[in-house]
Amino acid sequence: QSVLTQPPSVSGAPGQRVTVSCTGSSSNIGAGYGVHWYQQLPGTAPKLLIYGNNNRPSGVPDRFSGSKSDTSASLAITGLQAEDEADYYCQSYDSSLSGVVFGGGTKLTVL
Amino acid sequence: QVQLLESGPGLVKPSETLSLTCTVSGGSISNDYWSWVRQPPGKGLEWIGYIYYSGNTNYNPSLKSRVTISVDKSKNQFSLRLNSVTAADTAVYYCARMTYCSGGSCYPGGFFDSWGQGTLGTVPS
């Protein structure tokens, strides 16, 4: 069981907006540690998508955005495209564990 | 852009040691943190640990008793050793660069901005 909780799956039609939630606790997200998001396309390594709650690395489309509130965070994808079909992971730091923690991952299906 | 490439034996016998190396190119291994993350088949990501170029380490508490991460600055490489492996250690092992700051801001706890392609480590049951 992951320290950060994500829904196993989400889906949406092309052009729609979907969100992926990431729920933590007072020892990680709620303690002020940054939330970071990764996209893992089938058969490939994870790729940094969002860092520091809501910042996009160079080259990541502005269709992807992140937000954080209290002990939770969310990844939003607007204008959904077929190429967005992938697994998405949130990541933070946990002070109780003194280490990096990941969410269990969310599979996005584009209908 | 830094590139990372994992290498090492793909098959390890139960109770033996899994040894992997990550070669960093396109930049120096100095002044950064370097990490290992694994992913069992069909499952999520699990952080194993990280090392600073100076040699300071931090390991996942659930693996700490079996893990050693080391760095070889002369070869621009860092390595993972996982002892007493079982079938539960079968996974794709990724090496990654861990950073704390980007765009003028810093984030305690860090995040992974560059990843290797991953290598499958199999422990037969």
Image (cartoon, coloured by chain):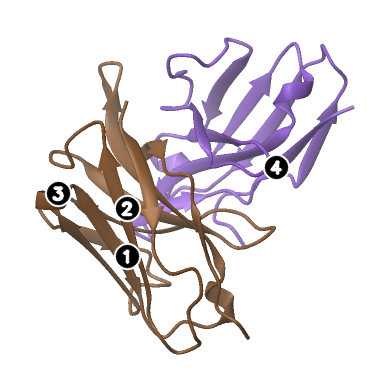
Chain colours: A purple, B brown
Look at mark 1 in the image and give the residue it sits on. Answer: B80
| Horizontal and vertical percent position of residue B111 | 38, 38
Q: Can residue B43 be seen in the rendering of this structure?
A: yes
Q: Distance of mark 4 from mark 2, alpha carbons?
A: 28 Å
Look at mark 3 in the image and give the residue it sits on. Answer: B53
- Tell me the quarter of the picture where residue B67 sits: bottom left
Q: Distance of mark 1 from mark 2, alpha carbons?
A: 8 Å
Which chain letter goes with mark 2?
Answer: B
Which chain letter goes with mark 4?
Answer: A
Look at mark 4 in the image and give the residue it sits on. Answer: A106
Residue at 66% in and 35% down: A21
Mark 1 Cα shell of 10 Å, populated few (<14), some (14-19), many (≥20)? many
| Position above or below: B114 against B5 | above
Q: Distance of mark 4 from mark 1, alpha carbons?
A: 28 Å
In the rendered structure, the answer to whether residue B61 lies left or right of residue B44 reads left
Q: Distance of mark 3 from mark 2, alpha carbons?
A: 13 Å
| Horizontal and vertical percent position of residue B73 | 12, 50
Marks 1,3: beta carbons within 8 A = no
For the residues beneath circles 1 and 3, the answer to whether they share a chain is: yes
Instruction: Tell me which numbered mark, 1 or 3, is placed earlier along the sequence.
Output: 3
Q: Foreground residue, B3 or A76? A: B3
